[in-house]
Every structure is written in C-alpha cells, then in structure tokens.
Amino acid sequence: MTVVVVEAAGARSRAGLWRWARNPSAVVGGTLVGLVVLTALVSLVWTPYPPLAVDPSHTLARPSWAHLFGTDEYGRDVLSRVMAGSRISLYAGVVSVLVATAVGVPAGLLAAERGGIPAQVVLRLSDILYAFPALLAAITLSAALGASTTTAMLAIGIAFIPVFVRVTRSNALVVLGSDYVLAARAYGRRPLAILRRHVLPNIATTVIAQMSLLFSLAILAEAGLDYLGLGTTPPTASWGNMIETGQTYLSQDPLLSVWPGIAIFVAVLGFTLLGEGIAELRNARLGRSA
Amino acid sequence: MISYLARRVAIVLVSLFGASVVVFAVLGILPGSPAQVILGTQATPQAVRQLSAQLGTNKPLWVQYLHWAHGLLLGQLGRSYVSQQPIGPQIARALTVTGPLVLFALVIGALVALPLGLGAALYNGKVSGTFLGALSQVGIAVPTFVGGILLIIVFAVALPVFPSSGFPGWSQPGQALRSLVLPAITLGLVEGAILSRYVRASVLDQLHSDYLRTARSKGLSRAQALWHHGMRNAMVPLVTVLGLELAALIVGAIIVENVFSLPGVGQLLLNAVDNRDLLVVQDIVILVAAVVLVINLLVDLSYHLLDPRVRDEGQR
C-alpha cells in the first residue's frame, strides 16, 4: 500500500517537473535567477580581484583577459564589483519582499476573515501606504534616516505591503466563500485552523508568484535608489551606484555603466519571468487561460 | 452614483490626511532641530533658539503639524529652511519641466503600448506574437536610468544629435523641446513596455469572449469584431493601467530628471534631501502622494462610468 502511494507521488512530481520544463517563462526565468544566485554565492568565496582593491596604474582600462569587464576610475576590477553587487541586489530583494509579505499577508487574511471594522482599518491603512510609491517612500525615509541599504530595503518593503494586502484578501475571500470552507465551518473548525488548512495552501502559489514579481521590482527600486545616492553608498559595490559613477566617465568609457546595467537587466528579467511562469503554471493547473 | 462618489472622495480625504501625518511623523523623528542643521554645529545655543522661534520649530509637534497642514490647505507651502525662498513658486517653476516631460512620456508610452500589445494579442501563439511579447518583457527589465544612459551613449555621445543633460528654459522653446526628447523617450519606452502587457492581456480576454465569437459568426472579420464590440470592454482595464502608469511616470520622472540633469520637481526633491531642506521634502512628497491618490480616485470613477457591472457592485 505504502509503495503504491510513494509511486503515485513520484509520478505526480515528475509530471510537475515536466510541466515546469515546458513553460518557457519558468525555464528562462528560473535559469536567469539561478545564474544571479550562483554569482552571488560564488562572490562570497571568490572574485577575480578583491572588489575594493584599487590599482592607480590601471584606471579606466578597456576589457582585456586580465580584466574581462575592464577597470573603473580607481582601477578596480569591474567584473569583481558586478559579482559583489549581486549580493546587495539579492539581499535587498529578500529583505524588502519578506517585510512586505510578513505584514501584508496576515493583514490581508485578517481583512478577509473578519470583515467589518478590522477590514476597514486594514484597507484604509493600506490605502495610505498606497499613496507612497516605493521610490517616494524610500526618498522620504532616507531624508529622515540618511542613505543606507537598510533604509532603502525597509522603505521598499513598506511600500509593497498594500500589494500583498490586496492580493491576499481578494484571493482569500474566494476561498472563504467556497463550499468546502462552509463544510469545515459546519464541522466546527476554528477560523485560524481554516486559514491555515484551507486558505493558505490555496493562495500560496499566487502569493509566491507575486513575491517573485515584487522581487524584481525591489531590485529595480533599490538600484534606482543607489543610483540616486540614497541607498548603498560607495565604496561598497552595488549595481546602482556603479552605474551612477560610470555615468561620469561616459565619454571615456561608456561600458562602465553598461556592465552593471546588464546585470540588473538579467536579474529583473529572471525574477519577472519566474513570477509569470509560476502564475501561468497555477492557472494551467486550474484550467484557466493565462 | 452620488453616494458612491461621496464615499470615494471621503476615503481619499482620509487617506490624504493619513499620508500627511505619516510624512510629517517620518520627517519629524529626525534628531537635531532644523535650526541646528541650518546654523551648523558651531552655532551658539542662543542663535539656535532664536532661529527655532523664528521658524516655529520650537513649538510642540502637533502645533507644527497643524500649522503645516493649514498652510497646505490654503496653498501656502512655506519657506525653505535653507534658501529662505518661498517653496510654492519653486515647485511651480519645476513643474514647467516635469509637466511636459510626463505628458510627452505618456503619449510615447501609449504609442508604444497600443501597437505592441495589440500585435502580441492578435498574433498570440504565433512566432511574431511571442516575439512582440518578449520585446515588452525585455523593455520592462531595463531600469529607466540604464535606458537613459544607453540613449545618451547613442544619441548624445556617439551621434551628438540631442543634448545629454541640462535644460535651457522655455525662453528658447526649440532648444528646450530638444533637451526633453531623450528623457521623454526613456520614460515612455519603459512605461510603454509595461502598459503593453496589460493591453495584450486585455485584448486577449476580449478575443476569447463569447460575444466576439458571435460577432465573428455574423461574418465580421476579427479586426472588425474587435473594433466594434471588443474595444470598449478592452478599454476598462486599460484605464486603470493608464492611471497607474501616470503615477509611475511621475515617480519615474524623479530618476530620469536626475539622469539628464533636468531642473524638474524630482531634482528639486533630491537637492532638498541632500541639503536637509526638510520642509521642501515634506511639501513635495505630500503633493506627489496627493496626485497619486487623486489619480487612483479618477481611475475608480472612470471604471464606474465605463462598466455598469462595477457600478452595481460599487453600491455595497
């Protein structure tokens, strides 16, 4: 009996893998995300040169075998700095998306389950936050607290909270209105148990797809703040601040801001596609058109 | 309809009040008084006290908030702590740059998004449709500042057709327009790419609808059926997106103005942040938040006008 069950589960996950493998968004997105994550992990233990090592005799060098992406205005190796910069972007993405999820999802669940005054309070608070787009929130916060990666991530995370409130609430409302939840209520299940056993598993994929999409927006926003000088500040390498300094040397070496630009492009494209892939796979499973 | 309108407006006013409290609180938690910041660390406590009294920053926070909010309602934005200049005229001058920039970008965005999205939907499942879809995906992943820098590299450094930065002022209309071309294209392309995804999804929805199949069975071509029956329905979600896009453009302008050194609202805001000119920051942030809220309100209302089903649902 046990053997049969295990086999069935194995067959199902193989079918799942096969569905993944046939979804171009998921494959391309997953590959690009994997590439960025791998780069960040490798950069922890190895980069061609130390990202902060200056070399005054080799400033603004063109790409060569010694320096694949060339060197910057201090003679620092650009490839090493792009690699190190991936850590800042991923770190910012992880923290801001976690902040938004940790606040937004429970608040959305509360609004869906309770309705009435709690729902109104949650929705009005989320309306207020909605008036501050991520970049504006971050500029305000860094005006108050000073520029740092932490300020930037926190502000982006807060600005994304309303998105999770809305997505969670609207999806949870659908589940809560279903017959099986009615049955579970009749059966005497407590609200928290219903949320945990019925609502969360059903909205998980949608929330995860949204997390991936917002991850890409978080990377964009954080890079933008770094570019404006309101996030990660030099000498720490981040893609945004590398582009900012690169712009100063545009006429001497245009590639200086192109390399980190490509890096942002790859990361953002990866997380967007992955998010869309997850959403498409979910819709396909439910028999809806994408 | 009237009660719905009143309710929506009330919600916007409450949100705006909440937003103003948030902005004031966030910028008010700052250590060190504005007077101290202006006078520097060398100033005598006496001078700091005197200037605090003059600026009104020695009063309790809630009094300061009321004073600020009261001024806002009367359209008085106060004077900059740093330059001592009135803030309203500064913002008005900056708007003569940001306004046209956002407007051009909106037009460019729509010009990019409609054909791209429509094409991607009509050729859905074919190679050309996939290609158009991928093109918009690529556009979304390019940050505005990178797009701007690429345009500078091509059209200002390699081929010096357009200026790479600066703004001569509207006294020279030709030059002024020329210096807005690259910034507007930068903003418009990126936003157009985002918008085209929604156009595609919206048109696809219509193409799969039952009434469009009926229209086709009457003998209309796909394009005719879409034009006569699908467009109005396809427009409903698009109005939302257009509104969101406008909000995104206003924020995007902050970055683009920085890329091209345009003296717009974004630059004013960032300079104020650099100089710790907090009243200017406070004023601009609340104004942008107000614009975002009003845009959202207008989007909701237009939804209401375009789609009777939403109208009924709104009565809840």
Image (cartoon, rainbow, N blue to C red):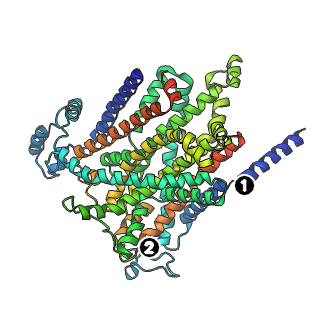
Pointer 2 chain: A
Q: Is residue A148 visible?
A: no
- Residue displayed at 45% across by 31% down: B305
In 3D space, how far apart are the residues under numbered discs 2 and 1 (Cα atoms)?
36 Å
Left or right of A232? Residue B308 is: right
User: Measured from the top left, where is residue B230 in percent x and y?
Assistant: 57, 41
Q: Which residue is mark 1?
A: A22
Compared with A153, B4 (above or below) is: above
Q: Which residue is mark 2?
A: A255
On the image, the x and y values in percent for residue B40 come to 16, 52
Q: Viewed as shown, does residue B289 lie left or right of A275?
A: left
Looking at the rendered structure, the kind of residue marked 1 is Arg
A54 up-or-down from A19: above or below: below
Q: Mark 2 or mark 1, which has the lower sequence index?
A: 1
- Amino acid type for the residue under numbered disc 2: Leu
For disc 1, the chain is: A
Q: Are marks 2 and 1 in contact (CB under 8 Å)?
A: no
Q: Position of residue B2 (x, y in %)?
A: 39, 22
Q: Residues within 10 Å of mark 1 (few under 14, many from 20)?
A: few
Q: Quadrant of the N terminus of chain B?
A: top left
Q: Hey, which residue is sitting farthest right in the picture?
A: A1
**SS of the residue at dot 1?**
helix
